[in-house]
Amino acid sequence: MKLDVQLIFWVDAFMYLMLHAALWYGLARFRSRVAVLWSVSGILSALSLCVLGSRGLIHVDHVVVFGQLLMALGNWGRQIALRSLDGPPDARWLWGMGLFNVLALGLSFGLHFSGAPESTIMVVFYSFYTLNCLEYYVSGRRMARSHDSIGATSIRWAGLVLSGSLGIKALAMITGIGSDEVYEASWDHAVVFAGQFAGITLLSVGFMQIFIDKAHRSKIAVQEQLAREQEHAALALEHSQTLSTLLAEREEIIRQLTLSNKSAGMGALVASFAHELNQPLAATLLHAELIQAQVKAANELGRSVDQQLLGTVASHIVSDTQRAGDIIRKLRALFRMSKGEFSKIDFKQLVLDVLDIVQVKTAHQKVRITTSFDDGFRLSGDATQLQQVVLNLVTNAIDAMSDIEHRERVLQIRGLVLPGYLDLEIEDSGIGIPQDKQAEVFSLFKSTKFEGMGVGLWLSQSIVESHGGTLRFLSQAGQGTVFTLRLPSSDYVLPA
């Protein structure tokens, strides 16, 4: 028994064991299954060398079977680990290499148990691994396209060294210039052991280099992803703040447009108010002059003042003054800026107040108004904003009938109470809205009127939507238009 060669088997096994155990320990922090598979496969190869170097210590059948089986499993495991660096290995390759290993083991075991010479079994063994180790060269070339070049080069050279040294041994045995004995000290055995030592070292260095490079790239990718997510979060926060600012500016614009729209549309109404105020003020002046004349006449004639006449005239003065005060109160309400304060509203009375405001205009244009309201026509909302919406819709309806000459000008107001909401329908018998203009009715700065600003209906829709309602219309050219204002009833929960 040539202990010197057997000792080399054990030394080679110890080298396998220490190298792969060190790799397992060094890569443990990555918690990678691929690293574990590589290390366990190397340990299996170390155990196979221990078995192959133990002939004479254990039965030869055990040496052949377990030595070659452990060697095949260790080698195949390392090849799978290399393939797994880029994800799960291809199933076709996996089955192909597995079948190749099974066929080689089956042939070797068959030769052994059939009594074939040991040299024949060794030629099969070395020839198989000569071809098998070319897989490392193929893997190295494939990895060079996407991984660390140093690691890929190490694996490629490892495949060449392993296949070359094993091929030299197989060729030496076939030609008869090499040793046929497993433990005989010979040059071809020296080539194999040197090739094994160099090849496995190159393989391990290459695997570790690629694995660490891949882990480093993954870490960089995670950091870049985290940086992108932080950037996106910062942008989202910035956009959120910008959106909040824009929403606040939108509310302010609506408030300013409300005032602007009121101011722009108040010209005719102010004239109407002035005319309407002149009536009670003129009557008050006349009644006051009448009282003054009666008092003066009584003083000159030396008789008492007619108390009944004074009482009647005084009551007229009070009535006319209250009328003037009511007109001024309504005018002030129209110009008051609203802060969006919601409260319970008698919507019927609000609509009647608006009709009262425009009565001079309707009388001037000979518009007949009809109203009908269901009981309980009440809701929650901002009275000033809703008054502005109704005023805008009513004045638009009156203006739409200004050019009607051959039929009666009728403005119909209907208040309907429906489950959960109210409908206010404002129908005119005007000229209607042209079909090509209907899509732009609620657009900002788009108006069907010659002198219109294009703000009123857009603003009205914004106010209605802020109350949780909708504003719709149906119109036929030459027949008139119906605007339907739908709002939640008084049970509506105010927006937070």
Image (cartoon, helix red, strand yellow):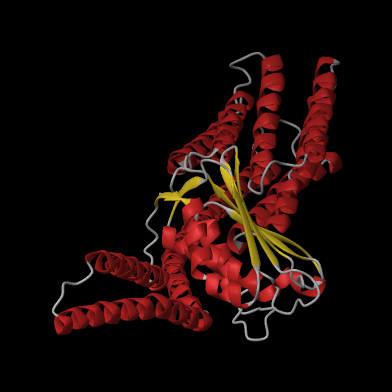
- How many circles with numbers are drawn on the protein? 0
Q: Residue 472 at x, y = what percent? A: 67, 58
Q: Is residue 78 above or below residue 115?
A: below
Name which residue lies at 76% across and 74% down.
Answer: 437
Looking at the picture, tell me which residue is in the foreground, 425 or 68. Answer: 425
Name which residue lies at 66% across and 49% down.
Answer: 86
Q: Is residue 408 above or below residue 128?
A: below
Q: Is residue 357 left or right of residue 147?
A: left
Q: Is residue 66 left or right of residue 124?
A: left
Q: Is residue 315 left or right of residue 64?
A: left
Looking at the picture, tell me which residue is in the foreground, 162 or 389. Answer: 389
Q: Residue 231 at x, y = what percent? A: 46, 64
Quarter location, residue 8 = top right
| Residue 88 shows up from this direction | yes
Q: Residue 188 at x, y = what percent? A: 70, 44
Q: Residue 193 at x, y = what percent? A: 62, 42
Q: Is residue 52 left or right of residue 311?
A: right
| Residue 389 shows up from this direction | no
Q: Is residue 130 above or below residue 4?
A: below
Looking at the picture, tell me which residue is in the foreground, 247 or 471. Answer: 471
The quadrant of the image that shows the N terminus is top right
Quarter location, residue 230 = bottom left
